[in-house]
Amino acid sequence: MNTILNDYADEVQAILARYPQDQKRSAVMPLIHLVQARDGYVTKQAMTEIAEIVGISVTDVASVVGFYTLYHEEKGGRYHLQVCTDLPCALRGADEFLAKLCENIGIKVGETTPDGVITIEEVTCLAGCHHAPMFQVQGDGAITYHENQSVDSALEIIAELRRKAAAQEAE
Amino acid sequence: MSKMVTLSIDGRSVTVPENTLVVDAAKMNGIDIPVFCYHPKMKPVGMCRMCLVEIGRPMIDRATNQPVLEDNGSPKIQFSPKLETSCTTPVSEGMVVLTRNDKVEAARKEIIEFILTSHPLDCPICDKGGECPLQNLTMRFGSKEGRFLFDEKMHLAKHVPLGELIWLDRERCIQCARCVRFQHDVVDDPVLDFHNRGRSLEIMTFSEPGFGSYFSGNTTDICPVGALTTADFRFGARPWEMKPAASLCAQCPVGCNLEYTVRREAKSGGATVIKRALPRQNESVNEIWICDKGRFGYHYTQDPARLGQPLVRRDGELVPVTFEEALKIIAEKAAHQPFQILAGGKLSTEDLAALRGLAQESGGKAWLHTYMSGGFTPHYGLSADANLGALGQGDAVLVAASDLHEEAPIWWLRVKQAAERGAALIVMNPRPTRLKKYARHVIRYAYGEESLAVAAMAEENLALAGEEIRAAAETLKSARNLVIFYGSEGLGLTGSKGLEQALADLLERGGFTGRENSGLIGVWHAPNLQAGFELGLPPAEGLADLPAGGVLYLAAADPAGDDPRQAAYFSGREFVIVQDLFLTESAKLADVVLPVLAYTEREGTFVSGERRLQRYYPALAARPGLKADFALTALIAKSLGYELEGRAASLALEKLAASQPAFEGLNYLKLAEVHEQWPQVGGSDLYYGGTSYANRQGLGKHLSRAAKPEPDAAPLREGIRDVPKNALRLVPHTRLYDAGSTFAPSRLLDQRRARRQLRIHPRSAEPLGLQQGSQALIELEGAPFTAEIVLDETIPGGTALYPRSLGVPMNAPFHAVVKPVFDKSAS
């Protein structure tokens, strides 16, 4: 059974409708976003289902998932905090910022906090070079940008994310 | 004829067709530009940068739009500030290419250094060592030392199985994407791809089974490093220890040209053995590719179960004797008896001719063991300079009753490519096959109605035909050439004969007979059935067709193994001789069993389904005491006082050429002729096409057109006899990885081997209580068998598909009651 078609029949049709009939493979990225919003990451099962919907091989779907840092193949934290450390950002202290931030919350790059809320990742260009240090938070199916950051401001955002997660857990 | 362009490469003026890439233009004129990612069979991507050259173009005055001239009147050349990739740059008029100056050499040195940043220096234990472009180019252009830090080399997994056939060494991979592009663009099995990016880029597969493609082995040929290796050969031998021998693949009728590389080794007790099979270039047959069945299928030739000594029946038991004794017994028992011979399609042309000769001399008859009919192909088949590779816009290809991807993968590839070049592909089959994707017309018919569907297309009156048939008939009207492949899906011998004649009629009515690239191709189940049909041997599905009495002589045919009920036909014979590689079920019933040489230990010829007569050479020395089939048949003939050519295969073919018009003028020397082929592969060049061998031993020759056969008046549809109540119609189909005696010994493919499964539509299965994955009992009279049920919505209702050569004792459609095998504990 195709769980994506099952859970998101209308959404899938709306996504497919954006592309020509013979170019269904164009729908692969929005579909990955759709399933990642549901599961938090992209399982092999989901890749197989997407491959079936757009008519390409599961290997090709996996290749797209593997190429983009916005897609996750492993279950990480609820929120992925992605810090850009490319050259222009590094010149504005992004690497130092990342190291200190990690030190403060006690995990290494790529790891998830014990409460399962935050995963810290190092990514390439987010197109915010002039406002570095900067990062984006990916989670709950949305992405938010946070520019001109300091370790303190970042810790505040993390605290806010933890409150949000706790509030949602409580519901 | 495309426009020609003149340019200068390293000071030489060369003229090539427009749109030629600079790297190819150079190679065509004997100049090697080193490459890694570029491959002449695939579109360029410019990923590796190894092919950088300096390119200049005539300067144009923007104001006047006229070429700027030097003082001496020659056009002024403006060189690009940077080097350009010669694999992505097409030639242009007046271009000046420099491939050997200091700037280019410095760039090559840097690219090599860059590629080697994390490449392991494990050449001494690498399978590619000795035939590796990276190794060769490093020796030629690389610097002695790298400036990158040795301690910072990436260390990655070195033994990654991409499935059980192909292994990946991630450290060695230089990310050229040749394998990825081959799988996507050439064979359309997109099961390899890149994962991640930058330094973390790696090859992966998510298919089930891993790297699920019938063409996977080719990626190990075109891999420019030792990253991809086959499980069959890896760590097997070093390239320089092995000797190559030209051969042919004996797994199907395509006739792919092969090179076996052999080595004498302690591991095999001092014997010389085949270590691997590699493609040998023949652009008219297999280009530079082979399928995995051909690559891994040779193991039967050196299987320990092969017979080494003749056996004769004494007191009911088969006991070993010498050849002299065996021949003496045959001379005693078979004297003055007619020989009824059943010959298999795995025999060489010379073997079949010898068997036919013995039958004629003794007053008997030789039959071809097959469930396919092909008597019309000598006249309606391909001839002269036919080449599937030349089919394109304006031509048509019809594939009827065949799943080419399963039956002959290289033909599938050639037909796919013809369709991509613009040929109109018509696919006729009762269920969808992989060719459907490339087809212009898809015609569905019910199993058993194949010749009716073809006849409908051939008839002028199309009013009664379906829309698709009418559209296909319309396409055929304007086609320049028509090549027809016909297979055996859903057909036994009778149905096959009907289909063959209907297709011949289609060619005839369309005026295609005699056109240079048109004709009928049988997708046979054996490599050399075509030769049998050329020799006029009548087909026989089993022994029921052979007259009783006399001597029964089976060569490379095992009717009792195919169907145990055939054993009954052995009892009424005076004397039974079986000649085979193995102690087959039929051999166990014989009076005399004669072992023979495998085709890899002797020379001979096969006629491909395209009617190309091709030579194979001995890869290994003849096993002591054993003889080739034709020589053995000649010895038998001699002991009975008949004269046959048994001295050499070349003499046997010459004798045949003198009496059989289609073979006229052909001999072993002609078959060994070669000409230059494009692209150039297999040399020690830097323009690297892969480990595929250059063809130095012969491209083969087409047979000439034979006389027109008489159509059969007999009923040509598969007869439906004694249909039991509630019976299903069971129809045969062919799976590539079967359990036939010449493929089963390749144990490597066991996991992918097809199983004895009955494919059936869920709606047909439900009322019978058959469930997915359950075992069913098929009540075939005299030979009941079980099979696993696979529910498949593409199978027409009321029918079920069973695979051939997987233990079902039938090769033709039949009706039978199918019911679940109930678990005893449940009742």
Image: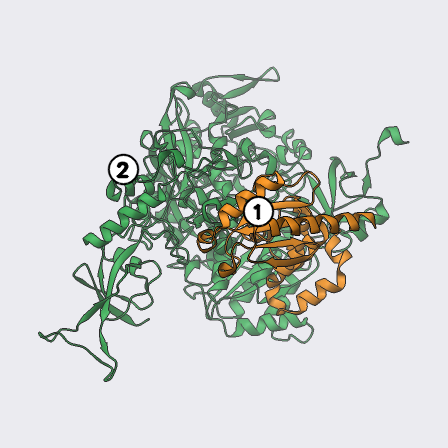
Looking at the figure, which quarter contains the C terminus of chain B? top right
- Is residue B175 visible to the viewer in this orientation of the structure? yes
Q: Position of residue B137 (x, y in %)?
A: 28, 43
Residue reaching furthest left?
B72
Residue reaching furthest bottom?
B64
Left/right placement of residue A167 relative to residue B253 reads right
Chain of the residue where label 1 is placed in the rendered structure: A
Q: Position of residue B169 (x, y in %)?
A: 46, 37
State the hue of chain A. orange
Q: Position of residue B511 (x, y in %)?
A: 49, 70
Q: Residue at x 29, y 66 (%)?
A: B91
**Residue B457 - label:** none
Kind of residue at disc 1: Glu
State the hue of chain B. green
Kind of residue at disc 2: Glu
Q: Nearer the viewer, residue B275 or B710?
A: B275
B590 over A51 or under it: above or below: above
Q: Position of residue B793 (x, y in %)?
A: 73, 54
Badge 2 crowding class, 10 Å Cα cut-off, few under 14, some 14 to 19, many 20 or more, is few
Q: Residue at x 25, y 37 (%)?
A: B144
Residue reaching furthest front?
A152
Chain of the residue where label 2 is placed in the rendered structure: B
Tell me the residue that label 2 is attached to: B145
Same chain, labels 2 and 1: no
**Residue A121 - label:** 1
State how far apart marks 2 and 1 are (Cα). 36 Å
